[in-house]
Amino acid sequence: MKILKDYKNKDVRLPDERIRHFASRLARNEMFDLLEESLSDPDFIIQSKSDPHAVINYKFHRGTKGDDKYLCVVVKYDGSDAYVLTAYPSDQIKKGELIWERKKK
C-alpha cells in the first residue's frame, strides 16, 4: 500500500489491489507516474453522482501516449479514511457538481 496526499494534504490510501486494478490501463497511456500529481494538484474536482462520499479529481496532461488527456482519480472519503477507488484517462469530463477548482494564474 502507498499513502498519497490529496489537494488538502490529507492522506489517501492507494491499496496494492487498486494499483493492480488500474496500473496496466494507465501504463499503456504513460499516465501511472502522473497519478500522485493528479491527486495532490488537480485542475478541478467533481462530486460523484453515483456515490456521495466519492469525488473525481481531474488533471489535464499534455503529450501523453494517445493524445492529451485528463487523468481522473476517484477517491472515496469515509469518515477519517480516504482511499483511491480507481483512476483512468479520459478526454471528457463527467457531469456533476464542481466542488473545487484551481485558481487561475
Image: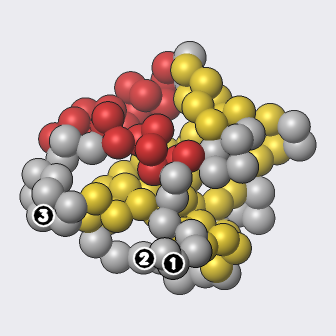
- For the residues labelled 2 and 1, the Cα–Cα distance comes to 19 Å
> Please, what secondary structure does the residue beneath circle 2 have?
loop
Left or right of 27 in this view: 40: right
Badge 3 crowding class, 10 Å Cα cut-off, few under 14, some 14 to 19, many 20 or more, is few
Circle 2 is placed at which residue position?
93
> Please, what secondary structure does the residue beneath circle 3 have?
loop
Give the residue type that dot 3 points to.
Asp
> Residue 67: which numbered mark, if any?
3
Query: Sequence-wise, which precedes: disc 2 or disc 3?
Result: 3
Q: Classify 77 as above or below 45.
A: above
Q: Give the quadrant of the N terminus.
A: top right
Give the residue type that dot 1 points to.
Lys
Residue 90, position as x, y percentages in the image: 31, 65
Residue 23, position as x, y percentages in the image: 32, 33
Residue 42, position as x, y percentages in the image: 51, 58
Discs 2, 3 touching: Cβ within 8 Å: no
Residue 3, position as x, y percentages in the image: 61, 24
Circle 1 is placed at which residue position?
104
Does the image show residue 36?
A: yes
Does the image show residue 50?
A: no
Tag in front: 2 or 1: 1
Discs 2, 1 touching: Cβ within 8 Å: no
> Please, what secondary structure does the residue beneath circle 1 have?
loop
Give the residue type that dot 2 points to.
Ile
Residue at the image point whose x is 11% and y is 51% from the top = 65
Badge 1 crowding class, 10 Å Cα cut-off, few under 14, some 14 to 19, many 20 or more, is few
Query: Sequence-wise, which precedes: disc 1 or disc 3?
Result: 3
